[in-house]
Image (tube, helix red, strand yellow):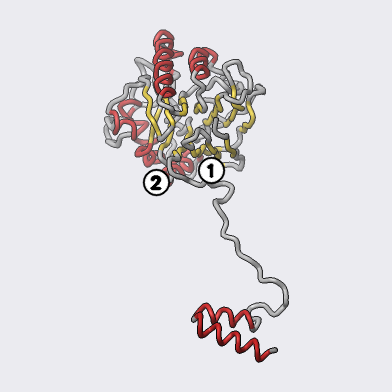
Amino acid sequence: MRRNRVVIAIAAAVLLGAAGLWVAYLVFGGGNNSGRPEPTTTIAGPAPTQTAVHKGDVRIAAVGDMNGPRTTDPDSPSGRNGAAITKLVENNEIDAFMGLGDFQYDTAYCKDYVDYWTPLWGGTKPKLYWVSAPNHDWEPGRNEDLDNFMNGQCPGNADKAAINKERGFIRNGKPYSKDFGNWHFAFLSSAHWRYNQGEARALTKWLDDDLAAAKAAGKHLAVVYHEPYFTSNTKSHERAAEHKPWIDVMWKHRVRLTLSGSQHNYERSCPVNNEDKCVEDGMTAFQVSTGGIGLRPFTSDPPYIEKRFSDTHGFLRMTLRPDGSFDWRFVPTSGSQTDEGSRSAP
């Protein structure tokens, strides 16, 4: 029997070359003399914390409430976030960075953006799409330099944000929208509700027209604005109830996704409608104000919030699919909390 096995092995080697030698190796029991099956090696797909990227996907990062007064320490929560997102930009791992407002504390002028924000976050500008927030970013007649900084017009820094490279100068508070693949994003400044409610109501009509046109073109809809409507209270802020006209328009057009900041913590809602009810076709509202400024605990517990924490700095990463589905993952940079999941296509 042994002689027959040798003959078979030699014949295989002659006929099949290298493959035949492997057959011979197996015939003589090479590599495993125990009689037990050889262990198998499985080539794994993406790790659970990663998202497989396919044609048409849009990859974004998002966060607001970033840099504290006079902060330049790269090991600060702000520095860690800025470095992590800058690396994503440099490695072309994201298509857009959504800056959700409150870029530099406390009251920011050109010099503050250049001296403090730029050393830690300046590398994000090539992919940056931004909205202005009230007070820290912009107050009419006081600090009005954010729009100049984003357009490279502050002394000491000529770099432009991605949207400014595409559109030129965008004044504080001016709305704009942009398509990313099969997704349409509208960008609004919450500051109008504080400083000029007439202008804020006028923007409601702009938003209605903008979302209607995008929906008619078959786009999935998202809105970026700083002060959140779907949120828990803190000692400093409650929900931005005056934003309700905007929320009604978002619900009318079935916006899928909103991104906000302001609260100095992290929250994610259920798909929610304009009456605070969890519904299948509602908006998933992310509130991501964990960019580096001090965090705040919650003082209320609204039923539409599915996930929240106030002890971890980090940022949100998302992959938006052409069919309207999306994946998300909160990336902690100082602290250990996280949040990840998926929403299916409509």
Q: How many marks?
A: 2
- Is residue 261 something that shows in the picture? no
Numbered circle sitting on residue 284: none
Q: Quadrant of the N terminus?
A: bottom right
Residue bearing mark 1:
333
- Is residue 338 something that shows in the picture? yes
Numbered circle sitting on residue 92: 2
Residue 44, image x and y in percent? 57, 56
Viewer-closest of 175 and 1: 1
Residue 264, image x and y in percent? 54, 29
Viewer-closest of 177 and 115: 177
Q: What element carries label 1?
A: strand
Residue 23, image x and y in percent? 58, 79
Q: In this view, does 70 lie above or below 142?
A: below
Residue lying at the far top in this picture: please name it.
Answer: 198
Viewer-closest of 50 and 153: 50
Say which quarter of the image contains residue 295.
top right
**Left or right: 272, with 123 as reference point:** right
**Label 2, residues with CA under 10 Å away: few <14, some 14-19, many ≥20:** few
Which mark's residue is nearer the viewer, 1 or 2?
2
Residue 42, image x and y in percent? 60, 61
Label 1 to label 2, Cα distance in Å? 20 Å
Residue lying at the far bottom in this picture: please name it.
Answer: 3
Q: Is residue 137 above or below residue 26?
A: above
Residues at circles 1 and 2 in contact by the CB criterion of under 8 Å: no
Sequence-wise, the earlier of marks 1 and 2 is 2
Residue at (55% x, 40% y) in the render: 329
Viewer-closest of 43 and 265: 43
